[in-house]
Structures are given as structure tokens and as C-alpha cells.
Image (cartoon, helix red, strand yellow):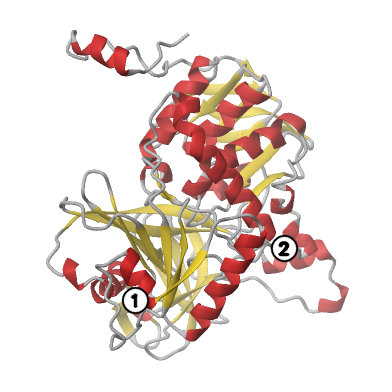
């Protein structure tokens, strides 16, 4: 349980949000030209990092908007929150 | 040769105040080289080592564990064992495990307290009823015992369930697998450790893997906190940390690691003599031999390695438990904890070779790995020893995420993952 600072609504409880998995996975531009391996990579393979991870969240019980988050998955500390389309503020 | 545990050894040791029992396993330092190294000293890892030594005559092997054996998810699960899975591949895998469970205490000379008290899965809406009936038929076609119960039969089998049709999610029926049940989770790890140790397997605790050394596409050994260990075969059984190990070898796995919580109540007299699981409201409960109610909650939806889950998950589970069992309304909870489970997109495990020669993965068990411990160890040992999967785990290869031939148990199994 932790608090999330929604970029649109401010600080709310994590239970108001839905995690959307790893961020910055680029949708293939030419899906018809993808090999099976590339599809598997895009659809299923995940970094699943223990440490600093970039991920997407949705404030489902609030403004219902998507945004990005940088979080340390080893202790659930949030390092940064930023809007969709923005560059991550930390490396 | 270890002394056999028996009524006579118990009496003999009673005379010396139980102070002279021999150690169940040694605490060796790692050798320079092994024929195979198993990463992860949980039930699955120790079972793998046991069957490698026993069935495949690989005695020069080691199990490395970063903490203490059985201290991860083996010691954190809710000990439920069943094999009533929908698809043929899963049914084969889990029933293989259940058949080994049935003779495990005798085989290991270690009481794993396997208790076939039955597992009942409840239906709360019409779709549940259809799904559970379909699964019952599928199970019976695969030779797995299963019966469908109507509401009255559910009430008869477990009288404390609230079968009032006025509650938010009324009980419309359920399935029962009588061969299913529970076992003592720690004993499984300890029994396999003792058996493996007796055959010469080195069980090395407090030894964390820091890197995997590769020469091209072949493994050469592992870097650990106790130095480099040379080996040609590495079997990774690291549960929630599988991706961490895979990243060391430059591999990516189709896994997400999430917290799964469980809790136990204060101990009370026997009140529930079976295991009851409810998919729709996600609550399951059984009673341990100590008298505690053992309650399983769900996973959080975010990736975390913190071994802590969110409070609202526990709250949701307890709400469901109280509606189904009003008799528990004044029970106090004693302990709550979290484990990190590695979940595949199809919620089925991976027991497989990889693109790197000599590197094998047994992972992705998600929320339901304990029940498979003996079968998983047996099949993973076969895969490592022969460099080929057994026919029972062939479907659980890592390439299914490329071919699309998934074993889609998500929601089709007896409880939602």
C-alpha cells in the first residue's frame, strides 16, 4: 500500500489506481512484417526489473487518465510521475 | 546412510531428551565444480536435486539458496494440493504431482502430513456453474476424480458455509475433488533436502547468485557470494526472482513478479475439515493442524519484489470470507504476509530449456506452485538430465510464447490467477 501522486488529481491511495505494466514498449509500426519472435518480444517478454522500473498506471477510480511512473520495485518507492508522451525525468 | 525415522528412533531419542538427533542435512561450502547446479532451495529446487540424484544418477550436484531453504514461497503458500485443471496438458502435469504426493511421506521417510481432505470449488453465478460443470467433465475424461455438487450437497459437505440465496454472491453449487487436500509446506522442503543430502547433494545456504558466466551460447558457471562455481548445467528455480537470474544471462522471460498475500487466524478447535475455494469472490480457506484458519488472498496488479501487498486486497478477501462464513466474524487474525509470485501471461508454468545451452528454467508457477512441487521437481530433473523435456512438460516450454500454443488456464483453472 502506498500513495501515488496523480499528475492530474494529486496524491491518492494506490487502491484507486490500476497498474498497466512496463512503459515505453513501442507498438510495431508494420505489424504485418513482424516475425513470430518479434511478436513474442512485443506481446509477452518483460524486463520485470527488481529495482528502478518504468511503468504505466491508470487512475481508474479518479480521473481515469493514464500516466507514467518510475518506481523502485524492491521497496515500492516512487521516484517520479510524468505524463504520457513526456520523457522520463530520471534515468 | 541416515538413520531411518520411525517409532523406535523416536523412543530411542526420547531417552536423551531429543538432543542427539543427527542433522537432517549438512551445511557444506561449495566445491569448485559440479555436474549441475540448481539455483533456488525451495521445494521445487530441492525436489529437482532429489530426483536428479535418485532417478538420473547425478550425484555431484549442488543447490544454492540465497537465504535458508524453504524460506521463500515454499514457506509462504497456503499448502493446497489439487489437480482439477481444465486443459489436458495441465491435468497431466498436476495429476502427475498428485500421484507422487500420495506416496511421498513413505518415499522420503519424512512425514509431509499430506491430508486428502478434499478441495471444494464454489460457483456463485450461472457462468461459474457452466464452467465448473465443464471442468468436472474434462477432469473425468482425464482420469481425475471430480464431482459436481448442488447447493444442498455443498452445505452437507461443509455445513458452516452460508448457502442463503439472499447474499450478494450466493452459492449455486460447487465441485469436489476428494483426492485433493493439503500438506505441511516446510516438511516438503525439509524432506527433499534430507533425501537429497543423503545421496550426496550439496545444499548450500546463504549463497546468492550474482552472475551467470557464458561462453557464447553455452553456460560455464555461476558467480555467487561464496565464489565462482563451475558447471555445465544450471537449473533455475527462483520463483519470483526468475527474471532477475534470466537478466544475468541476457535473457528475457514472459513473467511479471507480483505480491501474493495470505493470512492465518488465531488457533481454534476443528471447524472446517476440508479446503473451500471460491473463484468469483477470491477467497479460500482451510484449517491447519494447529487450528489456525489459513486464508489465501489475491495478487496485487503491480510488479513488486517487496514481499508486501496492499491492504485492500486482504480487506476484499476477508469481506468474502465473512459473507460465506458468518461464523468467523469474531475471529482475530494472527499473522499476514506476502510472497512474490512470477506469473506467465497464460498463468501456466515454464519447465523448459532455453536458447542458452545448459541453462534451464522452471518458473512461472504464479499463485499455484506448491501443489506441483514433486511433479515439477521430477519433470525438471528429467529435462536437465536428458536435455529434453518429458512428455508431461513438453507443452510447458518457453517457445509457446513464440508459437502461440499457450496453455491458457487463466480463469479456466479452479481459481482465478
Q: In the rendered image, which quarter is residue B317 located in?
A: bottom left
Q: Residue furthest left?
A: B330
Query: Residue B334's mark?
Result: none
Residue B254 seen in the figure:
yes
- Residue A37: image x %, image y %? 80, 61
Tell me the element at label 1: helix
Residue B180 shown left or right of residue B265 in the figure: right
Which residue is pictured at 72% across the width and 29% down the height?
B385
Which residue is pictured at 30% across the width and 74% down the height?
B320
- Residue A32: image x %, image y %? 86, 78
Q: Which residue lies furthest to the bottom in this view?
A: A63
A73 and B105: which one is in front?
A: B105
Residue B82 shown left or right of residue B217 in the figure: left
Q: In the rendered image, which quarter is residue B409 located in?
A: bottom right
**Mark 1 belongs to which subunit?**
A
Q: In the rendered image, which quarter is residue B27 located in?
A: top left
Tell me whether circle 2 and circle 1 mark residues in contact (CB < 8 Å): no
- Residue B366: image x %, image y %? 51, 56
Residue linked to disc 1: A15
Which residue is pictured at 53% across the width and 27% down the height?
B63
Residue linked to disc 2: A41
The number of discs equals 2
B391 and B64: which one is in front?
A: B391
**Badge 1, how many Cα within 10 Å: few under 14, some, many 20+?**
some
**Mark 2 belongs to which subunit?**
A
Tell me the element at label 2: helix
Amino acid at each position: 500500500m502506498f500513495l501515488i501522486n496523480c499528475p492530474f488529481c494529486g496524491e491518492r491511495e494506490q487502491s484507486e489506481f490500476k497498474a498497466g505494466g512496463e512503459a515505453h514498449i513501442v507498438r510495431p509500426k508494420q505489424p504485418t512484417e513482424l516475425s513470430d519472435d518479434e511478436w513474442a518480444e512485443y506481446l509477452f517478454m518483460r524486463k520485470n526489473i527488481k529495482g528502478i522500473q518504468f511503468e504505466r498506471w491508470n487512475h481508474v477510480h479518479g480521473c481515469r487518465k493514464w500516466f507514467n511512473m518510475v518506481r523502485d520495485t524492491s521497496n515500492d518507492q516512487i521516484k517520479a510521475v510524468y505524463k504520457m508522451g513526456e520523457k522520463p525525468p530520471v534515468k | 546412510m541416515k538413520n531411518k525415522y520411525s517409532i523406535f528412533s523416536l523412543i530411542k531419542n526420547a531417552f536423551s531428551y531429543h538432543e542427539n538427533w543427527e542433522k537432517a542435512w549438512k551445511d557444506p561450502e561449495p566445491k569448485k565444480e559440479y555436474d549441475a547446479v540448481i539455483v533456488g532451495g525451495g521445494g521445487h529446487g530441492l525436489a529437482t536435486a532429489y530426483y536428479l540424484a535418485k532417478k538420473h544418477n547425478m550425484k555431484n550436484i549442488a543447490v544454492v539458496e540465497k537465504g535458508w531453504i524453504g524460506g521463500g514461497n515454499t514457506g509462504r503458500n497456503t499448502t493446497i494440493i489439487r489437480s482439477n485443471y481444465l486443459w489436458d496438458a495441465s491435468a497431466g502435469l498436476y495429476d502427475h504431482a498428485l500421484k507422487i504426493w500420495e506416496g511421498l511421506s513413505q518415499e522420503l521417510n519424512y512425514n509431509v502430513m499430506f491430508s486428502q481432505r478434499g478441495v471444494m470449488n464454489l460457483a456463485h453465478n450461472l457462468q461459474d456453474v457452466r464452467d465448473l460443470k465443464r471442468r468436472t467433465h474434462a477432469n473425468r475424461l482425464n482420469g481425475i476424480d471430480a464431482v459436481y455438487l448442488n447447493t444442498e450437497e455443498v452445505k452437507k459437505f461443509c455445513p458452516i458455509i452460508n448457502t442463503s440465496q439472499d447474499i450478494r454472491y450466493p452459492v449455486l453449487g460447487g465441485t469436489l475433488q476428494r483426492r485433493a487436500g493439503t500438506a505441511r509446506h516446510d516438511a516438503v522442503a525439509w524432506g527433499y533436502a534430507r533425501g537429497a543430502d543423503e545421496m550426496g547433494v550439496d545444499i548450500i545456504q546463504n549463497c546468492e547468485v550474482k552472475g551467470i558466466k557464458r561462453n557464447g551460447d553455452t553456460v560455464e558457471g555461476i558467480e555467487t557470494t561464496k565464489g565462482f562455481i563451475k558447471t555445465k548445467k544450471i537449473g533455475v528455480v527462483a520463483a519470483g526472482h526468475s527474471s532477475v537470474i534470466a537478466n544475468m544471462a541476457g535473457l528475457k522471460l514472459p513473467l511479471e513478479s507480483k505480491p501474493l498475500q495470505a493470512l492465518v487466524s488465531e488457533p481454534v478447535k476443528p471447524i472446517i475439515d476440508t479446503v473451500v475455494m471460491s473463484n468469483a469472490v477470491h477467497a479460500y480457506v482451510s484449517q491447519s493442524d494447529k487450528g489456525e484458519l489459513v486464508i489465501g488472498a489475491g495478487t496485487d496488479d503491480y510488479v513488486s519484489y517487496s514481499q508486501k501487498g496492499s491492504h485492500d486486497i486482504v480487506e476484499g478477501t476477508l469481506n468474502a470470507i465473512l459473507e460465506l462464513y458468518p461464523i468467523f466474524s469474531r475471529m482475530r487474525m494472527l499473522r499476514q504476509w506476502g510472497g512474490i509470485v512470477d506469473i506467465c501471461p497464460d498463468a501456466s508454468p515454464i519447465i523448459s530449456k532455453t536458447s542458452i545451452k545448459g541453462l534451464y528454467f522452471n518458473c512461472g508457477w504464479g499463485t499455484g506452485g506448491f501443489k506441483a512441487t514433486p511433479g515439477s521437481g521430477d519433470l525438471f530433473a528429467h529435462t536437465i538430465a536428458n536435455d529434453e523435456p518429458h512428455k508431461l512438460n513438453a507443452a510447458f516450454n518457453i517457445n509457446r510464447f513464440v508459437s502461440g500454443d499457450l496453455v491458457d488456464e487463466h480463469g479456466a483453472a479452479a481459481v482465478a490467477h
